[in-house]
Image (cartoon, rainbow, N blue to C red):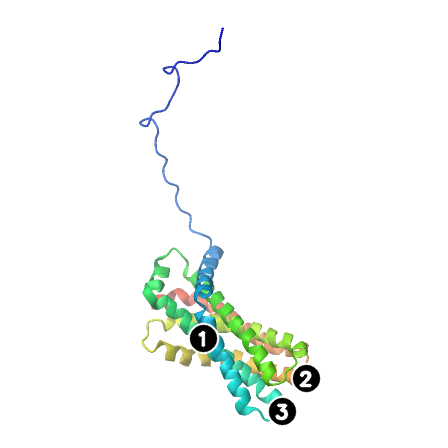
Amino acid sequence: EGSFVPSPESRHVPTDSSVKPRAPLPRVPPGWFRQVLIVARKDLRIELATGEVVTTSGFFAVLVAIVASISFFAGQDARREIAPGALWVSISFASVLALSRTWQRERDDGALRGLLVSPLSPSAIFLGKAIGVAVFVTIVELLVVPVVALFFSIDLSSDGPAMLALLAAATPGIAASGTLFGAMTVRTRARDLVLASVLLPLVAPSLLAGVAGTRALFTGASFAELGDYFVLMGVFGFVFVAGGLGLFESVLEG
C-alpha cells in the first residue's frame, strides 16, 4: 500500500569505472581585436602601478616648455613665433623619452621574449603597444598645453580646441612610427641614441605640419583653414600604422 521504493540493485548507479572522462576542450585563442586590447591593457596597468613613463616624460616636456618660454620670450610677437616651436619640441622630445621607457620594460626580465612566444599576433602586439604609447603621449600633451598657454599668454578658450585637434592628429603617427622603430632598436646597445636619431627625422613631416598649423592658428587662421595640415598628419599616421601592421613581425625577427 505504501509507495514503491526500488531496491539498490534495480537502480542504475554509474560507477567510477563506467564513467569516461571527457576530453579537454581545445583552447581557442582570443580574436585579433581582443589581442590588441590585452597588450594595450598590460602597458596601461603597468603605468598605473608605476607612473614612470608619464611622470618622467611629462616632467621633461614641461621643463622644456618653461625653459623655452623664459629663454626666447621677446614680447607679444613671441606668441606666434616661439610658442609653436616650444610646444612641438617639448612634445617630440617627451615622445622619444616615453618610447624609450616603454621598450625598456619589454627588455627587462625577458618580457619581450614572453610576448613573442605567446599566441598573440605580431600585428596585434604592434597596435596594442602603439595605443599605449598614444595614451602616454596624449597625457603629456594635456600637461604641456596649459603650461605653454600660461607662459605665452594664449587664450585656450579660442585657440585651445584647434591646438588639441592638431596634437590629436599628430599623435597616431608619432606613436606608430616610434613603436615600429623602437622594436627595431630594442636589441642595440646605444638604443636610446639610435631611437632618437632615427625617429626624429622620420616624424619631421608631422612635426613641421604641426608647427606650421599652430603658427597659422596663432596668427588668426580659422579651423577650416587648417585642413591641409590635418590631411598631411593624417596621411603620415595612416602610412606608419599600415606599415607597422605589415612589417612588425619582420622587425622583431630581424
Image mark for residue 220: 2
Can residue 203 be seen? no
Callouts 1 and 2 close, C-beta under 8 Å: no
State which tag comes first along the sequence, 1 or 3. 1
Q: Residues within 10 Å of mark 2 (few under 14, many from 20)?
A: few
Q: Secondary structure at mark 3?
A: loop
Q: Is residue 215 above or below residue 12?
A: below
Circle 1 residues within 10 Å: few <14, some 14–19, many ≥20: some
Which dot, 1 or 3, sits closer to the camera?
A: 1
Asked which secondary structure carries label 2, the reply is: loop
Tag 1: amino acid: Thr
Q: Which mark is residue 77?
A: 3
In this image, 183 relative to 134: left or right? Answer: left
Residue at label 1?
56
Res. 118 image quadrant = bottom left
Measure the alpha-carbon separation of dots 1 and 2. Answer: 34 Å
Q: Earlier in the sequence, mark 1 or mark 2?
A: 1
What is the quadrant of residue 86 in the picture?
A: bottom right
